[in-house]
Image: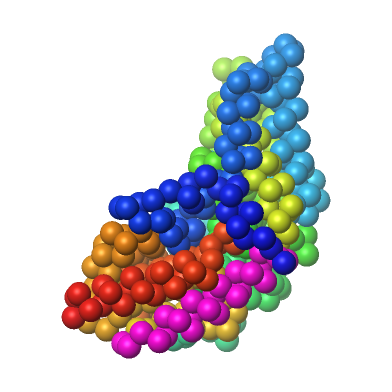
Amino acid sequence: MLDIQKIRADFPILSQTVNGKPLVYFDNGATSQKPQIVIDAEVKYYQEINANIHRGVHTLSQLATDAYEISRGKVKVHINAKHAYEVLFTSGTTHGINLVTNGFASILKPSDEVIVSSLEHHSNIVPWQMLCEKTGATLKVIPMNEHGELILEEFDKILSEKTKVVTVNHISNALGIINPIKSIIDKAHAVGAAVLIDGAQAVPHLKPNVQELDCDFYAFSGHKMCGPTGTGILYGKEEWLNKLPPYQGGGEMIKEVTFEKTTYADLPHKFEAGTPNIAGGIVLGTAIDYLNNIGFENIQQYEHELLEYATKRLLEIEGLRIYGTGKNKASVVSFNIDGIHPYDIGSIIDKLGIAVRTGHHCAQPIMNFFCIPGTIRASFSFYNTKEEIDAMVEAVKKAQTMLS
Ligand SMILES: *Cc1c(COP(=O)(O)O)cnc(C)c1O
């Protein structure tokens, strides 16, 4: 069992007041808060070892390089990649996805097809649309049902030998639905398609096992899993990373440069041009250690309790509807109240110290499906409490009274 009060003490921001009220932070789907150990590690890096990596023989450069590569090794173990060089540092999920779509621009032909799901974040829609525009390939979409679950029989119908890439998120940011990615990966592989999993919403809640999943790419952000902003990881299978051309040209990604020809560096450096977010990359390792110390089984069990409690309490409110009613869910509740715009509720409860996300959550196609402008999204982390959920429910009731 987790000692939530002790955990909360690790996060200095949680003891703040906002608008004169104790902060209730339920916008974890947008970014998580950071524990003191992560904040300290970032400061310590700049105080003690700041230097550029892979470049100098001097001591600090060696220390920085070692710390950066140790962190890569931690990520490799954490996601169970086969090789550390299959783990690329990026600035976030968006960067990772664009790295892949950029690479496929030289592979796809006009007769090829790409499949995305109707539950995707704009970050995992727009780059594929741009790729299809560039190559003439066709974009197809896996539809969902009214519970926010992908309809796999429809996926079977659009999947064919023409399909070259399938991409889906592990967990939907807008609805919290956990997708059956193993089954999607296996079906896609059966027709020879590559699979990219957008793991941005999964990594705060679970430990992905990329070898067991057998996905070809798995992208995520550090800032949603207690790490710093501007950090992320793209895992790619060695065969694919060797096949794809580099994303950016620059320093550190080359073996030899002449004006006639440049040869590229080996993995992972081929995809890591320029000076990266060194501090962030190192500190991402600290965040992963922190989460593993708490334990993902404990996190999941506790967050599931929060999800069930919040769902039950919110449904006590008359006229409240929850979107994403599928069975398999992470700790996210997306809802609306009859006749009231989500933005109005969000603004009023902000005055009461409650931070939720309102709007389309970068997933406009989902909102179009439900014919709504957006939702109110409360996304819970292991440092949240049932008392905070009670405070949100009271605040929403108050807003409802004021607005109706
Ligand atoms: C947040 C998010 C992204 C984008 O992540 P960035 O850190 O902004 O690059 C992509 N997909 C999903 C599902 C997300 O939740």
Q: Is residue 238 left or right of residue 145?
A: right
The spot of residue 184 in percent (x, y) is: 64, 74
Q: Residue furthest top?
A: 58
Q: How many numbered marks, from 0 up?
A: 0
Q: Which residues are magenta?
A: 297-319
Q: In the rendered structure, does residue 317 fall within the stretch colored magenta?
A: yes
Which quadrant is home to the N terminus? Answer: bottom right
Examine the image and state in which quarter residue 158 appears. bottom right
Q: Nearer the viewer, residue 388 or 366?
A: 388
Q: Residue sitting at 68 percent across and 53 percent down?
A: 291
Give percent across and percent down for residue 93. 53, 51
Q: Please indicate whether residue 398 sits to the left or right of residue 271 in the image.
A: left
Q: Is residue 109 visible?
A: yes
Residue 146 vertical position relative to residue 80 in the rendered view, above or below: below
For residue 196, what is the image quadrant?
A: bottom right
Looking at the picture, the colour scheme in use is: rainbow
Q: Is residue 206 magenta?
A: no
Q: Residue at x 30, y 52 (%)?
A: 19
Residue that appears at 57% across and 17% down:
259
On the image, the x and y values in percent for residue 178 come to 58, 73
Residue 216: % across, % down:
68, 58
